[in-house]
């Protein structure tokens, strides 16, 4: 299993950072590769379709939303990334007068080397966290 974790320190409170980073239906607000989000259901669980800039989409199912712990977790059901058994989560923690946003995932490479899969996912996380910081 491959693990990727990217973090960024934000010059705001954890609550303000969570208001932007926390909503499962709101990744398009702070990730530059996502043009819009379509919400639907996967059984009883919320599912999002993330429409990507340049075409394509990711389909993800919400596994956990804990606003008190400021953590959201989901599973990738379908998409163009060369990974399988993918589970990710975003958390926000307070660190003094700042917030730290943490985006993590565990997955297996699928059709590419582990290094290539790790670099692709880490790059996607970094782009999102950098845009999150720019929006705060």
Image: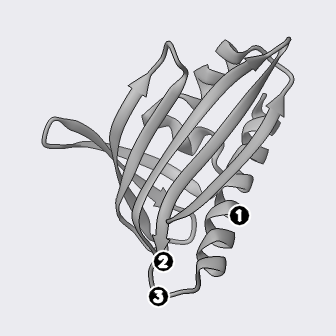
Q: Are marks 3 and 2 in contact (CB under 8 Å)?
A: yes
The residue under label 3 is 111
Disc 3 to disc 1, C-alpha distance: 18 Å
Q: Is residue 96 left or right of residue 37?
A: right
Residue, x 81% and y 38% (percent of image)?
A: 134
Which mark identifies residue 123?
1
- Tell which circle, 3 or 2, labels the residue nearer the N-terminal end: 2
Instruction: Name the image quarter holding residue 45.
Output: top left
Picture coordinates of residue 69, whole percent (x, y): 52, 18
Q: Secondary structure at mark 3?
A: loop
Along the line of sight, which residue is nearer the eye, 63 or 41? 63
Q: Which image quarter holds the C terminus?
A: top right
In the image, 104 versus 50, the foreground residue is 104
- Does residue 121 appear in the picture of this structure? yes
Task: Name the residue: 54% across, 53% down.
Answer: 105
Lateral position of residue 130 relative to residue 46, left or right: right
Give the residue at mark 2.
82
Front-most of residues 54 and 102 = 102
């Amino acid at each position: 299993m491959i693990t990727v974790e990217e973090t960024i320190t934000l010059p705001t409170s954890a609550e303000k950072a969570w208001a932007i980073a926390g909503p499962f239906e709101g990744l398009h607000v702070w990730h530059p590769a996502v043009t819009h989000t379509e919400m639907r259901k996967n059984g009883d669980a919320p599912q999002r379709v993330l429409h990507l800039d340049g075409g394509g989409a990711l389909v993800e199912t919400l596994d956990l939303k804990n606003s008190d712990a400021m953590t959201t977790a989901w599973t990738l059901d379908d998409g163009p990334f060369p990974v399988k058994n993918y589970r990710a989560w975003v958390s926000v923690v307070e660190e003094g007068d700042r917030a730290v946003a943490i985006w993590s995932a565990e997955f297996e490479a699928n059709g590419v080397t582990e290094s290539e899969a790790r670099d692709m996912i880490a790059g996607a996380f970094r782009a999102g966290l950098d845009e999150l910081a720019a929006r705060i």
